[in-house]
Amino acid sequence: MIKTVIFDMDGLMFDTEHLTSNAWIEIGQRHRIPITETMMNRMRGLPLDGCIRIFKEELGDDFDYWGLRKERVVYVDQWIRDHGMPIKPGLTELLEWLKTHKYQIALATSTYQAPADHFLDIAGVSTYFTCRVYGDMIEHGKPAPDIFLQAARKADTQPKECLVLEDSYAGVEAGWKAGMTVIMVPDMLPATKREYERIALCAKTLKDVIPFLENHEKSY
């Protein structure tokens, strides 16, 4: 029986993957650096060290990641100030349903703690998450299962009693390796045959998780 639902953040709860990609591409154009959507797609769901590695592979060891990242942070922060946090459809409904039905709600994001908490606060959903694991808390990021296993330990829940919600290939693989039930809610990349072999459901929106859990409860 599922007792804990573990959420990824970027691309699943918030439409920040599009925002971050647009920021990097625009910064690349500003500095005449060929940062592309294809390059961004390689990084979906990966921890920081994986993203930096791909930048270096694509653009050379002298690519000034940290210098340009400051520009990306300014771009994203300004966009959110102007437009608000881009919340994914069904997020609020799902969180409220889970709370009402006494599920534990956990966060497992590759984003570091300070920016992740900031995003949760802006979106007004921070209080739902009783257990949180961030990218700067673990040694091996997604697609390794460590972040989800640590979230299960924090929730005092066995992996088989956890449901992982993910949008990325790396996240799906991590949840599957952790021995958890996985639902994929695709964001910028569609589910492939590989993901369909590892997930219990490919959902259109987070709201589709509710009937899945209702049916799951009926089987117990």
Image: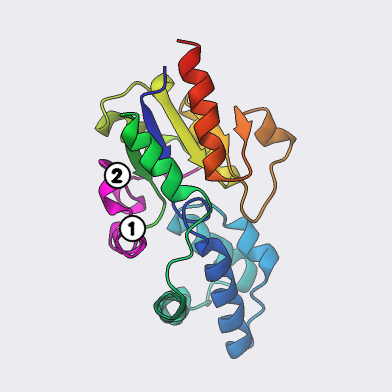
For the magenta stretch, what is the residue range? Answer: 113-142
Say left or right for 25 vs 88.
right
Nearer-the-camera pick, 160 or 139: 160
Say left or right for 158 vs 93.
left
Count every numbered label the image shows and give the total. 2
Residue located 49% across and 26% down the image:
213
Is 141 a magenta residue?
Answer: yes
Task: Say whether disc 1 or disc 2 marks the residue closer to the N-terminus.
Answer: 1
Say left or right for 216 vs 34.
left
Callout 1, which amino acid? Leu
Q: What is the x, y in percent for residue 209?
A: 52, 35
In three-dimensional space, the C-alpha distance between marks 1 and 2, rounded to whole angstroms, equals: 9 Å
- Pointer 2 residue: 129
Disc number at residue 120?
1
Q: For numbered disc 2, what is the local secondary structure? A: loop
Image quadrant assignment for residue 155: top left
Callout 2, which amino acid? Phe
